[in-house]
Image (cartoon, grey):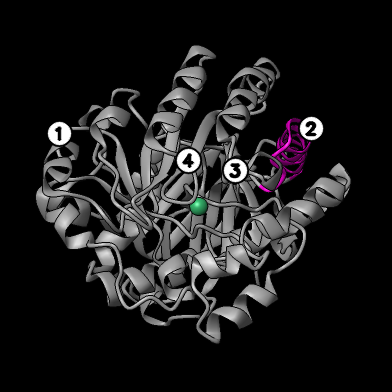
Amino acid sequence: MTLMPGPATRNASPRGWLLITNIGQLLTLGSGRLDAGPRRGDDLKELGIVSDGAVLCVGGKIVSVGTTKDALRDSWIRKHRKELTEIDCAGKVVIPGFVDSHTHPVFVSPRLVDFEKRIEGASYEQIADAGGGIRSSLEAVRNATKTTLERKLLDVLQDMAAYGATTVEAKSGYGLTVESELKSLEAIRKAASTWPGTVVPTLLGAHVVPKEFQGCSQKYVEIVCKEMIPRAARRSLARFVDVFCDKGAFTPEETEQIFAAARGHGLSVRVHVGQLSETALGPLLRFDPASFDHMDHVNDNDVRQLAKRNTVVTLVPGANYFLGLKTYPDARRFIDAGVPVALATDYNPGTSPTVSMPMTMSLACTQMKMSPAEAIAAATINGAWALHMADRKGSIEPGKDADLAVFDVEDYREIPYWFGAKRCEMTILNGVIASHH
Ligand SMILES: [Zn+2]
């Protein structure tokens, strides 16, 4: 990624005045109804498409959205045109920057042994028992310096932007000691201060019970609740607390305990749930989680409950793909029941090493039967809801952050269609241009 290269740099206005014109298809995702909550049912298909569109951004915010004809007639734009950085997007598609609401980017090395062992037929549990899985990433993170973690993370964020993401949720969770979890969150904060996009930090101290606490998980839960959460909250190092609530990880009771500690320290909660086995969601809903993530296994009663709530179900089909699973979460069941659904990469070294939201959307379309329009809304506006940021992110509307992705395609349906390809040629992150040629 290069920041502001070429002619755009020379014309760049110091005040971040940006006019994007002649957009073939501008997907605004605008509803003008911020109080309406996350998109559900048929509303998930509403993309708010403007042909020959234009967007004016000033100081990192979107100021006006409409047709190019109207923009060029606007008296303010006419008066200031020479001072504006103008980007011609003729024949291209512009969408809100993706909101990748579930990633685990703080690790050191890829897990190639897991990869090969799984191909040979080993299960998730067998790989963990053989010393692979989440635990095998721990040692490297515990030994790494903050600077190493920060550099790796910045590279990943830049890669993600090259595929169209402008907002990324980033979890800790490969340290699992107080010191290394706080170090991971500090690395996230450091990388976030350099990257022009928006990073939302999450404490995932309860990713798995570390080996030192096997057989006495309660002792580890106490450390999460009484040390990690208070210290992360005191220094504003995390916005959310996440728990991996599943067999082989944390029980629903332990999850509730951790959620109570999080809420007690003013942090919101989200949870990995239903990936390997079904968990009753009622007791967890009392903590009003921003998102339930994975959700391969869920009962009908809980689906009905979720249709009445703003808790988003975040689907991460990259994990199913990479694990070579035959089944995927039942996106249609959720959408048709009126449950709000988001899509995220679940970028992590063990089960979903992809930075690509377009690839994730492609899997959603082919494997979960979401339409291209539904996949786009799930990857933008509903991702923003899943991070409690819909007032700033996820659509191209006046007042929101200037987060846009320019794709070198004529029709938005090509974004999930050309699977595995990189068609994003530019992202605008809080008004800063990044070119990806
Ligand atoms: Zn995850």
The crowd level at tag 3 (other Cα within 10 Å; few <14, some 14-19, many 20+) is many
- The residue where tag 1 is placed is 308
Q: Earlier in the sequence, mark 2 or mark 3?
A: 2
The x, y position of residue 261, in whole percent, is 51, 18
Dot 2 and dot 3 residues touching (CB under 8 Å): no
Q: Earlier in the sequence, mark 1 or mark 2?
A: 2
User: Which residue type does callout 2 highlight?
Assistant: Glu
Chief secondary structure of the magenta span? helix
Q: Which mark is residue 250?
A: 4
Determine whether, in the image, residue 366 is placed left or right of residue 121.
Answer: left
Vertical placement of 417 versus 215: above or below?
Answer: below
The x, y position of residue 401, in whole percent, is 50, 37
One can see residue 358 in this view: yes
- The residue where tag 3 is placed is 209
Residue 137 is inside the magenta segment: no
User: Which residue type does callout 3 highlight?
Assistant: Val
Vertical placement of 259 versus 152: above or below?
Answer: above
- The residue where tag 2 is placed is 179
Residue at 86% across, 51% down: 148
One can see residue 68 in this view: no
User: Which residue type does callout 1 highlight?
Assistant: Lys
Vertical placement of 7 versus 19: above or below?
Answer: below
Residue extending farthest front: 215
Rounded to the nearest angstrom, the CA distance separating label 2 from label 3 is 16 Å
Q: Earlier in the sequence, mark 4 or mark 2?
A: 2
Rounded to the nearest angstrom, the CA distance separating label 4 from label 2 is 21 Å
Residue 176 is inside the magenta segment: yes
Q: What segment carries the magenta color?
A: 174-194
The x, y position of residue 426, in whole percent, is 58, 63
Mark in front: 1 vs 2? 2
Residue at 67% across, 27% down: 237
The x, y position of residue 15, in whole percent, is 67, 35
